[in-house]
């Protein structure tokens, strides 16, 4: 079981290998368990030292083919968040992160009501 003391839970910096989308829960694999995978808000912030774009998308995301990309974060700390309506949730297993340059990454946080 994962101990979540607060509703807001930072998942840390995710730095995928370019061309290989990573899960947003890469630092906490236990979040893939159905009990923990449903959240109300997801927040992404590009690392301020990034030199390229970071892509947010579906499990089938393919940046080279421009498929499955839902949002693009620019370098320099750009951010994006989504919030569910009351009574609904997002499944964090349905999101992936990819980047243009090795070493670029994104901070991810989730909120559970």
Image (cartoon, grey):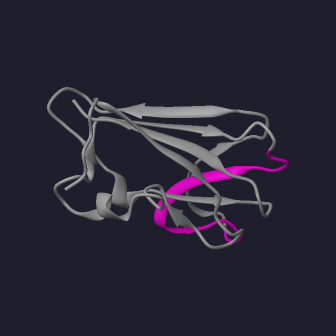
Relative height, residue 43 to residue 28 (above, below): above
Residue 111 in the image: x percent, y percent? Answer: 33, 33
Relative height, residue 33 to residue 46 (above, below): below
Most extreme residue toward the right is: 51
Q: Is residue 111 magenta?
A: no
Q: Is residue 22 left or right of residue 76?
A: left
Q: Which residues are magenta?
A: 50-65
Q: Which image quarter is the N terminus in?
A: bottom left
Q: Is residue 6 left or right of residue 24?
A: left
Residue 78 in the image: x percent, y percent? Answer: 69, 33
Q: Which image quarter is the C terminus in?
A: top left
x 37%, y 64%: residue: 29
x 48%, y 33%: residue: 81
Is 108 or 28 nearer to us in this picture?
28
x 65%, y 46%: residue: 72
The answer to which image quadrant residue 41 occupies is top left
Q: Is residue 59 magenta?
A: yes
Residue 59 in the image: x percent, y percent? Answer: 45, 67
């Amino acid at each position: 079981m994962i101990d979540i003391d607060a509703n807001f839970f930072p998942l840390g910096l995710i730095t995928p290998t370019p061309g290989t989308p990573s899960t947003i829960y890469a630092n906490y694999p236990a979040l893939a368990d159905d009990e923990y995978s449903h959240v109300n808000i997801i927040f992404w912030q590009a690392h301020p030292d990034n030199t390229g774009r970071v892509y947010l998308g579906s499990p089938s995301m393919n940046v080279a083919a421009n498929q499955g990309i839902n949002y693009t974060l620019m370098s320099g700390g750009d951010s994006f968040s989504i919030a569910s309506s009351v009574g609904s949730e997002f499944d964090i297993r349905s999101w992936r992160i990819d980047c243009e340059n090795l070493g670029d990454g994104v901070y991810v946080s989730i909120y559970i009501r």
